[in-house]
């Protein structure tokens, strides 16, 4: 396997990262649901599905380009949250790590002269800019709200639920969505 392009190996690792992110956001959503924060919980349930879609669009890319596909297990996720701020900090840290991973994938594709791979990663770069920005904003709102968690619910309801139902027409196809 040593002559396999590095991009392909990294992309397979990334499928695991995206599935793990999905599982982590499910844990986050359930914690928030138990804290009686239904709007914020709904936001993270939706994020969990988005992360699964990221993984499954990478699966679709491997299928479309005739490369071997393996569906991995996921890494352990955290459930021992202490506060809403703790949760959002974790989510922001996760998105920053994914941004580094996606950037490395794009750089590797370019270094290897893999134009298809480079093109495929472009949407994910844009997506990470949005996800880090929106999670940073959410962290600021959570910190500003302090003890008043209704402010957070109100913010999510006003600002974040709008984008949740809309599908991005530029998003890459997701395996299984054509079934
Ligand atoms: Fe993702
Ligand atoms: Fe994400």
Image: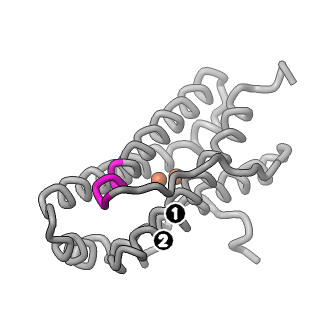
| Residue corresponding to mark 2 | 30
* Neighbourhood count class around disc 1 (C-alpha, 10 Å): few under 14, some 14–19, many 20 upward: many
Could you tell me residue 31's position as x and y percent?
Answer: 44, 68
Q: At numbered mark 2, what does the secondary structure look like: helix, strand or loop?
A: helix
Residue 160 appears left or right of 109: left
Q: Give whichever of 120, 134 is nearer the camera.
A: 134
Measured along the vertical axis of the image, is residue 14 above or below residue 9? below
Residue at figure coordinates x 12%, y 58% from the top left = 144
- How is the structure coloured here? one colour
Label pair 1/2, CB-CB below 8 angstroms: yes
Could you tell me which secondary element the residue under label 1 belongs to? helix
**Magenta stretch, residue numbers:** 83-89
Q: Nearer the viewer, residue 127 or 82?
A: 82
**Quadrant containing the C terminus in the rendered view:** bottom right
Q: Quick check: can you spot residue 164? A: no
**Mark number, residue 12:** none
Nearest to the observer: residue 135 or residue 144:
144
| Location of the N terminus (image quadrant) | top right
Name the main secondary structure of what is drawn in magenta: helix
Confirm whether the magenta stretch covers residue 65: no
**Above/below status of 56 relative to 149:** above
Other-residue count near label 2 (Cα within 10 Å), few / some / many at <14 / 14–19 / ≥20: some
Ligand 2 near label 2 (Cβ, under 8 Å)?
no
From where the camera sits, is residue 62 visible? Answer: yes
Tell me where residue 173 sits by quadrant: bottom right
Residue linked to disc 1: 27
Q: Position of residue 90 (x, y in %)?
A: 39, 48
| Residue at figure coordinates x 51%, y 52% from the top left | 78
């Amino acid at each position: 396997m040593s002559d396999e392009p590095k991009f392909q190996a990294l992309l397979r690792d990334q499928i695991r990262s995206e599935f793990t992110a999905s599982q982590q956001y499910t844990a986050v959503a359930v914690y928030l649901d138990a804290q009686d924060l239904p709007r914020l919980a709904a936001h993270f349930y939706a994020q969990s599905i988005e992360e699964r879609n990221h993984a499954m669009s990478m699966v679709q890319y491997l299928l479309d380009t005739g490369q071997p596909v393996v569906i991995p297990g996921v890494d352990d996720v955290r459930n021992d949250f202490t506060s809403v701020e703790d949760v959002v900090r974790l989510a922001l840290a996760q998105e920053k790590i994914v941004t580094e991973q996606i950037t490395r994938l794009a750089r590797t594709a370019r270094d290897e002269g893999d134009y298809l791979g480079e093109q495929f990663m472009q949407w994910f770069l844009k997506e990470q800019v949005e996800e880090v920005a929106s999670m940073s904003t959410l962290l600021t709102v959570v910190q500003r709200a302090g003890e008043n968690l209704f402010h957070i619910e109100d913010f999510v309801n006003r600002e974040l639920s709008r984008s949740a139902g809309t599908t991005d027409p530029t998003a890459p196809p997701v395996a299984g969505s054509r079934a």
